[in-house]
Image (cartoon, rainbow, N blue to C red):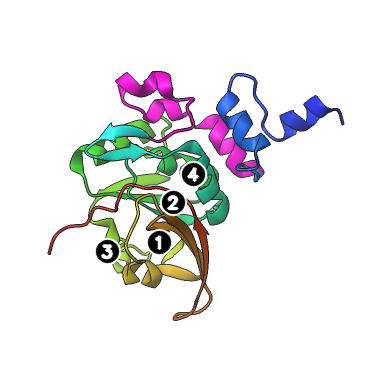
């Protein structure tokens, strides 16, 4: 195999220097995640006045004090989450919808992404963006206006979600991991979330036991919650 053949195998694309750099620097490693990054264009999830900045490896504002996350950070979080075809995933703080679409591309027609956003305007913005890829029409992704810190409002009312989620991803920083997320995760499942300035991976080993791994050195907007 030549060097160029190897790059094609890893998803190397001359027209996408940002993704190429994420691969070469080791942030993107898993083929199905790389393919999702290649197919789901970040530019489709940016406000009109930001589209020319899509290739920047930086967080960008999307309004209401929120951002579309830095590509390096999204790549790292998805690599820790390890989404797989057929997974049911809760995407908390869905914002622009970029992570929702990336996850929907990975889980495929037999999977399900439930995106929760607390800001009505951002919920509509993200929903419109994800609809460009027909994930909503195909039933792979759906958007809910709710307080993500409380998890999905009522999993028991949805037979396909009654057993909980395979994975949970949060894109805004919490003070601590909400109990609702732990309760709504299947045994063997993963939660990837920012807490403070670290990304944390939680693996559910039993109903009460979680393995915890901390990756420090990141910056996130805070998770918005409803005041009681």
Element under disc 2: strand
- Label 3 or label 4, whichever comes before in sequence order: 4
- 70 shown above or below 227: above
Q: Are marks 3 and 4 in contact (CB under 8 Å)?
A: no
**Residue 223 visible in image:** yes
User: Is 49 in front, or is 215?
Assistant: 215
Give the main secondary structure, helix, strand or loop, of the magenta stretch: helix
Residue ID at (51%, 66%) = 189
**Residue 84 visible in image:** no
Q: Nearer the viewer, mark 3 or mark 2?
A: 3
The quarter of the image holding the N terminus is top right
Badge 3 crowding class, 10 Å Cα cut-off, few under 14, some 14 to 19, many 20 or more, is some
- The answer to whether 147 appears left or right of 183 in the picture is left
Q: Nearer the viewer, mark 2 or mark 1?
A: 2
Residue of label 3: 150
User: Is 83 in front, or is 87?
Assistant: 83
- The answer to whether 135 appears left or right of 225 in the picture is right
Element under disc 4: helix
Quadrant of res 89: bottom left
Residues in magenta, as a range? 31-59
Element under disc 1: loop
Give coordinates of residue 203: x percent, y percent. Answer: 52, 68
Residue ID at (23%, 56%) = 147
- Label 4 or label 2, whichever comes before in sequence order: 4
Residue of label 2: 112
- Label 1 or label 3, whichever comes before in sequence order: 3
Q: Are marks 2 and 1 in contact (CB under 8 Å)?
A: yes
Residue of label 1: 160
- 3D distance between C-alphas at marks 2 and 1: 9 Å
- 3D distance between C-alphas at marks 3 and 4: 24 Å
């Amino acid at each position: 195999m030549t060097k160029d053949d190897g790059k094609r195998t890893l998803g190397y694309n001359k027209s996408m220097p940002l993704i190429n750099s994420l691969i070469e620097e080791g942030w993107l490693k898993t083929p199905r995640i790389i393919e999702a990054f290649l197919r789901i264009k970040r530019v489709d999830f940016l406000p009109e006045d930001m589209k020319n900045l899509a290739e920047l490896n930086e967080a960008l504002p999307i309004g209401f004090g929120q951002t579309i996350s830095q590509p390096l950070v999204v790549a790292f979080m998805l690599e820790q989450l390890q989404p797989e075809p057929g997974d049911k995933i809760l995407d908390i703080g869905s914002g622009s919808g970029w992570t929702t679409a990336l996850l929907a591309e990975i889980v495929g027609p037999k999977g399900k992404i439930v995106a929760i956003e607390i800001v009505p305007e951002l919920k509509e913005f993200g929903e419109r963006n994800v609809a460009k890829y027909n994930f909503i029409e195909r039933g792979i992704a759906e958007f809910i206006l709710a307080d993500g810190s409380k998890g999905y409002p009522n999993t028991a009312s949805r037979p396909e979600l009654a057993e909980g989620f395979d994975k949970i991803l949060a894109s805004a920083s919490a003070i601590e991991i909400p109990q609702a997320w732990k309760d709504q995760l299947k045994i063997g499942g993963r939660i990837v979330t920012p807490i403070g300035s670290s990304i944390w991976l939680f693996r559910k080993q039993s109903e009460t036991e979680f393995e915890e791994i901390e990756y420090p050195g990141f910056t996130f907007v805070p998770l918005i919650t409803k005041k009681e």
